[in-house]
Amino acid sequence: MYLTAGTYNVILRQVSLLGLNESEVLAELGVDNSLLENTTNKVDANVVGHSIEYIVRQRPDIRIGLTMGFNFPVSVIGVILNVYQNCRTLKDVFDKSPLYAPAVNTICLFSNHTDEHFFYHTMKVADEFSEKYPVATKHIYESQYGIILQLIYALTGKRITPISVSTLYTQNTSPDLLETFVQCPVKFGEPFVMVFEKDFMQTPVINANAELLSIAERLVSQLLEEEQLQITSSIVRRYILQTIPGINLSLKSTACNLNMSERTLQRKLISENTSYQNILDGVRKELAKKYLEENVSFVEISFLLGFESQSAFNKFFKKHFGQKPTRYRDKS
C-alpha cells in the first residue's frame, strides 16, 4: 500500500503550518528527501502511518486530517487532475474513481452508488492499515471529506455542498469541527459516506487543465519564496498562497488552521496595521496580474483565485484596478 509523494507532501505541509521543522521531522521519521522530489513516487503506507501519528503526537489538540483534506496544494490538485483529464462530467469522475484512485492512493478503498434521489460516495481504509495505525486512520478518514470537495471544486469550479456526511467517530464538540468544515449535517458513529443530490453528477468538468495548474504552481511558488517573515500577516499570506485555489478562504477557516481563534487572528493583524481581507485581496491582486500576463483565460483565473464566478472576479478586478480585466490585458 502507498500514497504518491505528491499526496504525502500534503501531510508534510501540516508540519510547517504547525510550527514544526520539516527537516527534523523527516530525519526523525527516516524519510529520504529524494523520494519526495517527484510527485508520482510511491511512499510506503508504513511511512504514511508513522508520519501522521508522529505529527499528531506533537499537536494532539488539532484535527490534522481535516486541515490536510481542505488545504490541498496546487501541485497535488494537478496530479489528480491529470488522472481525470478525460472526464466530461462528475459522473465520469466518480464512475472511474475506483479504477483511477489507486494511481495516487491504495490505502483507501472507494465505492459509489445511487438511488432514485441521491448519490453516495463511500470510502474505507484498508484493514491492514487501520489495525496497525488506528490514530492515523482517523485522520485519513477525516481528510477525505476535504479531498473530495476540493477535487470537485478543482474539476468544476463550483463549491458543491453535500446533503449529509457520516463518520465512524464520535462528536467532539457542538458543533463538531467536521460540521464546520463540510457545512452540512453529520451523522456520527456510522461508516464513512458523503451524500449528494443525484443531479450533481451531471455537473460538467471544465478545469482539468494540467498546463494551467503548472503555471499556477510556478507563480505561487515564486511568491512563497519571497515571503520569509515570521510576523502574523506574513504567516497568513503564506497560508493563503498555499491554499489558493480552494473551497474555503474564509477568516474562520484560516484562523482554525493556524490554531487560533478568529478574534485572536484579527487582533494580531490589526496590531500590524492590516486585516485578513486586505491580505487576501493583496494575494488575489498579485496573482491576477501574473495570470493575465500568462494569458490564462478569465474563467480559469476566477477559479484559481477562488471566486464563485467570472463576474465576481471581474467586479473584484475593476474595484482594485479601476478597469475591466479585458482592458488591462489589451493594454499589457
Image (cartoon, rainbow, N blue to C red):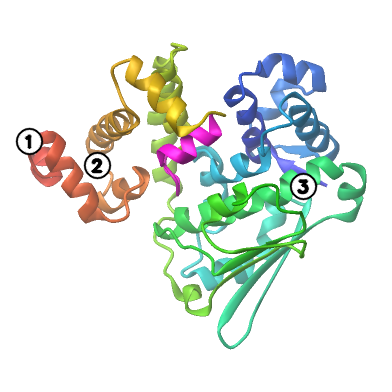
Q: Could you tell whether 38 is left or right of 30 in the image?
A: left
Quickly name the residue at label 2: 295
* Marks 1 & 2, CB-CB < 8 Å contact: no
Quickly name the residue at label 3: 138
Q: Which residues are magenta?
A: 244-258
Q: Under tag 1, what secondary structure?
A: helix
Q: Amino acid at mark 1?
A: Lys
Mark number displayed over residue 41: none
Relative vertical location of residue 157 with respect to residue 37 in this rendering, above or below:
below
Q: Could you tell whether 128 is left or right of 253 in the image?
A: right
How far apart are the alpha carbons under marks 3 and 2? 43 Å
**Is any atom of residue 271 visible in this view?**
yes
Q: Amino acid at mark 3?
A: Lys
Q: Could you tell whether 168 is left or right of 195 in the image?
A: right
Q: Quadrant location of residue 296?
A: top left
Label 3 crowd (10 A; few <14 / some 14-19 / many >=20): some
How far apart are the alpha carbons under marks 1 and 3? 52 Å
- Sequence order check, earlier mark of 1 and 2: 2
In x, y percent, where is residue 174? 62, 51
- Kindly identify the residue that appears in the image at 78 percent across and 37 percent down: 48
Quickly name the residue at label 1: 331
**Is any atom of residue 222 visible in this view?**
no
Q: Under tag 2, what secondary structure?
A: loop
User: Which residue occupies the foreground of this view, 103 or 59?
Assistant: 59
In x, y percent, where is residue 317? 17, 41
